[in-house]
Structure formats: structure tokens, C-alpha cells
Amino acid sequence: MTAERTLVLVKPDAMQRGLAGTILQRLEGRGLRLVGLKLTRIDEPLARRHYAEHEGKPFFADLVAYITSSPVVAAVFEGADAVAAVRASVGATNPAKAAAGTIRGDFGLETGRNLVHASDGPESGERETALFFAPAELIAWTRDADRWISENP
């Protein structure tokens, strides 16, 4: 297992529904270590950089308008295979197809309002983290419990 960092955004629909704490709690409960956290408002230039891979697609303008419509919680989680662990906890992009017990499976209804963004790979985790956090805003630390969570803390 490889220790990784991954970005999680608690999206506007989750913020409006009061689910930020529940989402963060589920990821921490999984054994992931929180190393960065902030409440922020994404402006249009940042939204365009974050979702650059979708530029030119029919839904791009709506995606930018949505992510900039409300504050979000930006979080960085760290741990063994953190990207895969977060994505498994979050569930399928389409909440109707997400497994029960996942964040989207338990709380989501529509693809366009799927509560949370999770990096899709280690490289995007690093790239996206750098969009939202300066290096000094990330705190490297270990928990005594890490040795009980992972064989290679």
C-alpha cells in the first residue's frame, strides 16, 4: 500500500443540506487522516481550472455555475491508497447507481447533485490539492492509531 493524498470537496448541494460533517466523519472513520481543511468559496477561474478536463462539454457552464453557487468544504485526506479508499466511500458518480453504504448511495439522488468531489487518481489528487491548498496549509502528522489502521503507516 502506498500513502497518498487526495482532495475532497463537499459540494454546494451537500453544504445546503447540512451534510459536511457527516461526509468528513465517514472519511475519517474509514481510517484516513485529515491533513488539510477549509471552508471556501470557489471563484470562476478556480472552477475552470479544477474542471478543465470538462471544458467544451455541454454541461461545463452548468458545472462551473453550480460549484461556484455556494461555499464548499475543501479537505485533503492522507493514508494508504487514499484515492481508492475515498472513491469507494463516496460511491458511483450517479447516486442512483451508487451502492448503499456509500455517501452518494445513502444521500444522493442525481448525477448533477452528487454531494462530493473526490480525486480520481494519485496524480489528480496532487494536482487538485495544489489548486486549493498552499503547502504550508497541509499539516503532516501521525496518529498513534495509524499502526492499527494500516500495516505500513
Image (cartoon, rainbow, N blue to C red):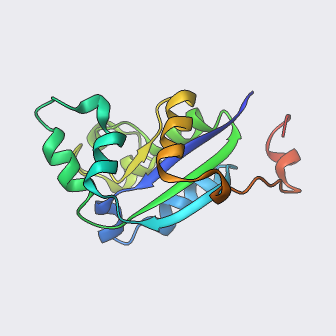
Most foreground residue, 8 or 30: 8
Tell me the quarter of the picture where residue 84 sits.
top right
What residue is at 83 percent from the left and 53 percent from the top? 142
- The spot of residue 61 in percent (x, y) is 14, 44
Image quadrant for the N terminus?
A: top right
Judged left or right of residue 41, residue 63 is left
Image quadrant for the C terminus?
A: top right
In the rendered view, tell whether residue 56 sits above or below residue 45. Answer: above
What residue is at 41 percent from the left and 66 percent from the top? 19
Tell me the quarter of the picture where residue 68 sits.
bottom left
Judged left or right of residue 76, residue 32 is right
In the rendered view, tell whether residue 143 sits above or below residue 131. Answer: below
Most foreground residue, 55 or 6: 55
What residue is at 63 percent from the left and 38 percent from the top? 82
What residue is at 49 percent from the left and 49 percent from the top? 8
- The spot of residue 147 in percent (x, y) is 88, 45
Most foreground residue, 97 or 85: 85
In the rendered view, tell whether residue 53 sits above or below residue 19. Answer: above
In the rendered view, tell whether residue 124 sits above or below residue 48. Answer: above
- The spot of residue 90 in percent (x, y) is 46, 44
Judged left or right of residue 150, residue 55 is left
- The spot of residue 31 in percent (x, y) is 70, 50
